[in-house]
Structures are given as structure tokens and as C-alpha cells.
Image (cartoon, helix red, strand yellow):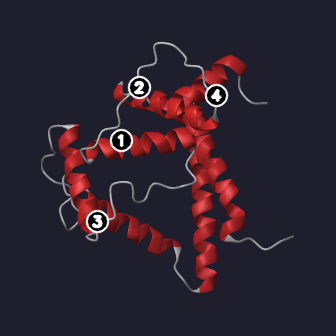
């Protein structure tokens, strides 16, 4: 059997994460969700164990790093010592502005609002992230009007149409990736 590596485990980490999403989106029971979350946690444990064997970091280091990041990035929720604030911002917009400000301060070289969006994200989810970040940075991507399906003659035109669909979904508060997954389930049924 081949040795486990971070690279050899990537496909399983992604699969388990998508299984969690499917469990939530299909309304599966809490026992199913608990099991799927456990499968994702197992992937985290395996990656941390591989790193520990190399002498790089441990699972505890991952947990401490996550705790520090959550406290640092959410000053509207936590005090610097990690205890909860007495009150929280009134609106989601205020929370997002505070979070964006903290994120920006973490990258003073100002690499731009699209930094950190994984290239491996599914295309619709990636487009939605780009559109959301552009809008939050003050450069909204116009949502295309989709009154009728245009005659698409190339992949480039198809790409522009898909981007317009995602922009239109985002403008209406919809998640294009989740919507398409739901449409596939409705049209074709659950995978066997």
C-alpha cells in the first residue's frame, strides 16, 4: 500500500467536505451530519499526523492557530483575551466590514480583494466568491439580464453567460453552486 501524503489525501478531504454540504442541503438528520463532520475531522487529524511525523506541526498547533485566528479576525465577537464581547454589531454588514478590515490588516502589502480564493473551488462557487469580494471592495460586477438564452457559439461566450448567471444569482442573494446542485438532485435524483 502506498504511503499516505498530503497530496494523496486531497481527493478524500474534498469528497468528505462535499458530503457534509450534501447532508446539510438534503436535510439529512443530525446523526448523518454528525457522521459526515466526523469524516472531515478525520481528514484534519490525518493531515496533522503526517505533519507531526515530519516534525512540522501537531493537531494541537492547528487548534491553537484556529483559536487565535478566530479571536483576531472577530473582534466584534471576542475580546483580545478570547472571552466573548458583551454586545455584538447590530447588522451583518457591520460584521462583514469589521472582518474585512481585520483581513486587510493581515496583508498590509495589499494583494487585493481576491487573494486567498482557492483556484480549486468549483467554478460557480469561485465566480460567486470573486463577485462578492469585488462588490465588497467597491467594484461590483454587473449582473447580466437573462431574459432569454443567447445563441452561444464559443466557450468564451458560454463563460461570459455563466458569469452573468452567477452575478444575477448573487444580486438576488442566491448561491449559484448550491442552486445548481439542488437542480441536479431534483432532475436526476440522488447519486447511486
Q: Nearer the viewer, residue 140 or 83?
A: 140
Tell me, for residue 132, which label it has, or none. Answer: 1
Q: Earlier in the sequence, mark 3 or mark 4?
A: 3
Q: Which residue is mark 2?
A: 144
Q: Earlier in the sequence, mark 1 or mark 2?
A: 1
Q: Earlier in the sequence, mark 3 or mark 1?
A: 3
Q: CA distance from mark 4 to mark 2?
A: 18 Å
Q: Nearer the viewer, residue 106 or 89?
A: 106
Residue 79 position in % (x across, y down): 17, 61
Q: Which residue is mark 4?
A: 153
**Which dot, 4 or 2, sits closer to the camera?**
4
Q: CA distance from mark 3 to mark 1?
A: 18 Å
Q: Residue at x 34, y 64 (%)?
A: 111
Which residue of the protein is positioned furthest toward the front in this rendering?
153
Q: Around disc 1, counting alpha carbons within 10 Å, would you say few (fewer than 14), some (14 to 19), or many (20 or more)?
A: many
Q: Which residue is mark 3?
A: 110
Q: Earlier in the sequence, mark 2 or mark 3?
A: 3
Amino acid at each position: 500500500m502506498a504511503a499516505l501524503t498530503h497530496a494523496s489525501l486531497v481527493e478524500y478531504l474534498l469528497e468528505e467536505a462535499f458530503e457534509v454540504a450534501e447532508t446539510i442541503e438534503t436535510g439529512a438528520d443530525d446523526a448523518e451530519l454528525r457522521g459526515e463532520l466526523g469524516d472531515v475531522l478525520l481528514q484534519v487529524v490525518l493531515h496533522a499526523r503526517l505533519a507531526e511525523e515530519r516534525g512540522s506541526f501537531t493537531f494541537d498547533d492547528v487548534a491553537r492557530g484556529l483559536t487565535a485566528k478566530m479571536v483576531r479576525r472577530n473582534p466584534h465577537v471576542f475580546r483580545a483575551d478570547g472571552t466573548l464581547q458583551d454586545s455584538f454589531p447590530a447588522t451583518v454588514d457591520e460584521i462583514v466590514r469589521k472582518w474585512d478590515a481585520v483581513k486587510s490588516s493581515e496583508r498590509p502589502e495589499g494583494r487585493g480583494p481576491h487573494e486567498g480564493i482557492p483556484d480549486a473551488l468549483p467554478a460557480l462557487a469561485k465566480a460567486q466568491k470573486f463577485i462578492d469580494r469585488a462588490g465588497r471592495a467597491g467594484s461590483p460586477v454587473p449582473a447580466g439580464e437573462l431574459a432569454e438564452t443567447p445563441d452561444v457559439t464559443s466557450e468564451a461566450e458560454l463563460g461570459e453567460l455563466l458569469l452573468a448567471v452567477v452575478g444575477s444569482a448573487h444580486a438576488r442573494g442566491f448561491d449559484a453552486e448550491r442552486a445548481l446542485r439542488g437542480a441536479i438532485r431534483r432532475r436526476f435524483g440522488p447519486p447511486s
